[in-house]
Image: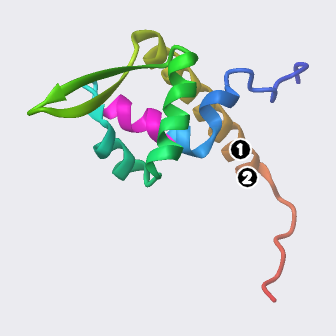
Amino acid sequence: MSSGRYAYDGLERVIHEKARLGILTSLLTRPEGLVFAELRDLVNLTDGNLSRHLKLLEQEGLLSIHKSFVNNRPQTLCQLTEAGRQRFLNYLQTLEQVIKDASKQTKTDNSPKPKPA
């Protein structure tokens, strides 16, 4: 067994947080981007909470935010950057490795199972 085998350096804290994971997943499925209200509803966050997470993800270079007016109403469009898309896909590959490693362990684990209470 190599040193650090289960360190999973590809799991980035900025992505791993539940709300940000949902935001990035939503944006990965919609390359053209999502308007703020759609994204808010998909990830079930308040306006303020979503804004805070979007600002952090934008600062990290994972997404871009475009503000405009549509029918005289302000509209905010959020899109993954190309670098953000690649970082997120790399993160998902690492997460898949975590699942594979855990699955191997559960298949080879012959220890007695706890009895239901």
x and y, in percent, of residue 77 in the image = 29, 28
Whole-percent x, y for residue 93 in the image: 56, 26
Give me the disc on residue 102: 1
- The crowding category of the residue bearing disc 2, from other C-alpha atoms within 10 Å (few below 14, some 14 to 19, many at least 20), is few
Q: Residue 33 versus residue 54: which sits nearer the camera? A: 54
Say what amino acid the circle numbered 2 marks: Thr
What secondary structure is the magenta-colored segment mainly?
A: helix
Quarter of the image that includes the N terminus: top right
| Residue at horizontal 52 percent and vertical 27 percent from the top | 55
- Tell me, yes or no, whether the two marked residues, 1 and 2, touch with CB atoms within 8 Å: yes
Q: Quadrant of residue 30?
A: top left
**Left or right, residue 66 beside residue 107:** left
Residue reaching furthest top? 83
- Looking at the image, residue 27 sits to the left or right of residue 51; the answer is left
Q: Quadrant of the C terminus?
A: bottom right
On whether residue 62 falls in the magenta region, the answer is no
- Secondary structure of the residue carrying tag 2 is helix
Q: Is residue 106 above or below residue 14?
A: below
Is 60 positioned to the left or the right of 66 in the image? Answer: right
Q: Is residue 43 or residue 69 the one in the foreground?
A: 69
Q: Read off the residue under disc 2.
A: 106
The residue positioned 53% from the left and 45% from the top of the image is: 49
Magenta segment:
22-29
